[in-house]
Image (tube, grey):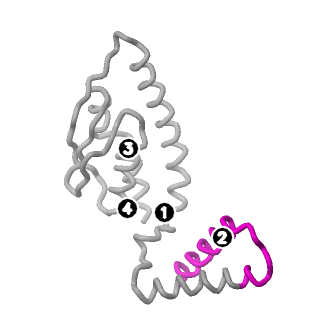
Amino acid sequence: MLQLGLAAVILYAFWLLLSGIYTPFLLTMGALVSIAVVWLAHRMDVVDREGHPYHLSWSAAGYWPWLVKEILKSAWQVSRIIVDPRAGPTPTLTRFRPRQKTAVGLVTHANSITLTPGTLSVDVGHDEIVVHAFTREGAQSVHDSEMDRRVERFEGEA
C-alpha cells in the first residue's frame, strides 16, 4: 500500500512540476487523476517492486555521487586520448560475467557502463555483459570492477 501511495505522490508532484497552473480546481483534478492512474495500474498489475524500486532510494543516494565522479574521470581520460595524437584509441569488445542477480541490478550496471564515456554496453544478459570500449585499458577495467561491486551492494539492499 505504501508503494501505491508513493507512486501517486510522485505522479502528482511530476504533474505539478510540468503544469505550472495552480488553481484549486486543477490541483484537485491533478490529485484525483494521479490516484486514478495508480489505481488502474494496480488493477492491471503493473505496479510492482521492480518497476517502482523505491526501496533502493538510500543506496542510490550513495551510488550516484560515485558514478558522477567516475563519469567525469572517464570523460577526462577519453578527452586526453582524442587530443593526444600519440595515444590513439584501441577499440575493443569484451565480455564479462556480472555479479548482479536481479533485473534492476543488471540494468543499473549496464546503464552505468554506457553512461561512462568510452564504454558502451552492447548486449546484456544474466550470464554476461558485452561491452565496447574505446581503449583496451577501458575494456580490462570492466572485469571485476569497482562498479560491479558497488552495483552489487546497491542491489543487495533490495
Among the two numbered marks 4 and 3 on one chain, the one whose residue lies closer to the N terminus: 4
Q: CA distance from mark 4 to mark 1?
A: 10 Å
For disc 2, the neighbor class at 10 Å (few under 14, some 14 to 19, many from 20) is: some
Tag 4 residue: 104
Tell me the residue that label 2 is attached to: 13
Q: Earlier in the sequence, mark 3 or mark 1?
A: 1
- Tag 3 residue: 114
Is 48 displayed left or right of 143 in the figure?
A: right
Mark number for residue 94?
none
Given this view, does label 4 or label 1 mark the residue nearer the observer? 4
Of circles 4 and 3, the one toward us is: 3
Where are the magenta residues, as a range? 1-28
Judge from the rendering whether residue 8 lies leftward or rightward of residue 140; answer left or right. right
Residue 152 in the image, given as x and y percentages of width and height: 37, 53
Q: Quadrant of residue 29?
A: bottom right
- Residue at 33% from the left image edge and 41% from the top image edge: 120
Residue type marked 2: Ala
Q: Which residue is mark 1?
A: 56
Q: Residue at x 64, y 75 (%)?
A: 12
Contact flag, marks 2 and 3 (Cβ < 8 Å): no
User: Which numbered disc flags the more N-terminal residue, 2 or 4?
Assistant: 2
Mark 3: give few (<14), some (14-19) or many (20+) Cα within 10 Å.
Answer: some
Which one is in front in this view, the residue at disc 2 or the one at disc 1? 2
Residue 32 to residue 121: above or below: below
- In this view of the protein, which residue sits in the foreground, 72 or 85? 85
Q: Please state which amino acid type lies under the numbered disc 3.
A: Thr
Instruction: Say whether marks 2 and 4 touch (CB < 8 Å).
Output: no
